[in-house]
Image (spheres, grey):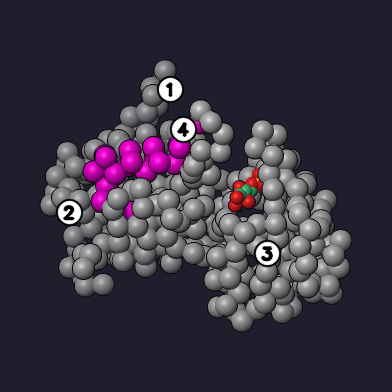
Amino acid sequence: MNRSGLMNAVIVPGRNYTEQAAKIASALNYQLARIHWKEFPDGEQYVRIENPELLSSKTAVIVNTMYPGQDKSIVETLMLADACLRAGAVDVKLVLPYLAYSRQDKLFLPGEPVSFSIVLKTLRHAGATGLVTVDAHSPEKLAEFQGKVVNLLVSDLLVQEALKYSSNPVVIAPDKGALKRAEYAAVKHRLRFDYLVKTRDRVTGQVSYQPREVSISGKDIVVIDDIISTGGTIAEASKLLLEKGASSIIVAATHGLLLGNALDKIRSAGVRKIILANTLASRLQEDIIEYVDVSVRIAEAVEKVLEKVG
Ligand code: R5P
């Protein structure tokens, strides 16, 4: 990255990701804007850049994440983009490691909206021209942002951590959609990879598996996924793999929402360890969970998104 790019960009931290934003600013030697945030009694948010002069003629890089508090975080990011442009920023880039609504990326049932499309278009409409995200659920849908996008895969970093607990594991995608991220990590670490065939009842959300031959008997397994939400996918996949003779299961997932009793489900399915990236504002203190810091890789991606296209 040419150093003038560094001088011309300012990191603008979102409320959900202030600590990571500061880390990214320091890794890149960028200045950091100070944000005053408050909530009105009716629940509406207010933001103000306390040092707006910093933004004048600069590119604003808003660093936020969208979980928890997805809707608030979307609105906050839009308000920050507007505030940066009004303070004289010449461009706005977004760093949003977790993108909310990414799983409603098409019509599954008649009468639904495509929520992810709305989020991407709204962010673009607010003036952002570039986006860095981590392990988007459907990377091909990011084109709807209609700007420069860097989608970082971090499954290799998660598997690297998983290798501390497993020996020559087979990397398994719990559904075909996760195959690319499993392949990416497996190829980097010279491991075998395969996938399972999952179906989900669109009304109840219940996950089930179709028969498919995978040769894993006696092997350690690393199950790779983008999101753990209710834990149904990971729990059902892990049970199936253990029934098929796997000797141990480590889970490596990028975004660990782990809602409700997800952790209990995963524990009782026989999983030994859950390795997660630190892409969310929530962090669970549990022996079974380990977090991998991906902020250095995000910082590298910020440099890419600031480079001029072409
Ligand atoms: C689905 O296609 C995703 O990649 C994840 O497998 C899914 O979102 C996980 O959700 P849950 O933990 O509720 O099964």
Range covered by the magenta-colored residues: 112-131
Residue 69 belongs to the span the image colors magenta: no
Which mark is first along the chain, 1 or 3? 1
Quarter location, residue 6: bottom left
Q: Earlier in the sequence, mark 4 or mark 1?
A: 1
User: Do residues under tags 3 and 1 come within 8 Å of each other at their CB atoms?
Assistant: no
Query: 118 and 82: which one is in front?
Result: 118
From the image, tell me which residue sits under label 3: 195
The residue closer to the viewer here, 307 or 142, is 142
Q: Residue furthest top?
A: 42
Q: Give SS at disc 2.
A: loop
Secondary structure under tag 4 reads loop
Q: Earlier in the sequence, mark 2 or mark 3?
A: 2
Q: Residues within 10 Å of mark 1 (few under 14, many from 20)?
A: few
The vertical placement of 78 against 135, above or below, is above
Q: Earlier in the sequence, mark 1 or mark 2?
A: 1
Judged by depth in the image, the label closer to the viewer, 2 or 3, is 3
Q: Relative to 31, say whether 4 is above or below.
A: below
**Alpha carbons under labels 3 and 1: distance apart:** 44 Å
Chain-order first, disc 2 or disc 4: 2
In which quadrant is the N terminus drawn?
A: bottom left
Query: Pointer 2: residues within 10 angstroms few (<14), some, or many (20+)?
Result: many
Label 3, secondary structure: give it.
strand
**Distance in Å between CA atoms under marks 2 and 3:** 45 Å
14 left or right, relative to 308 = right
> Badge 3: how crowded within 10 Å, few (<14), some, or many (20+)?
many
Mark 2 touching mark 3, by CB under 8 A?
A: no
Gap between marks 1 and 2 measured at Cα: 32 Å
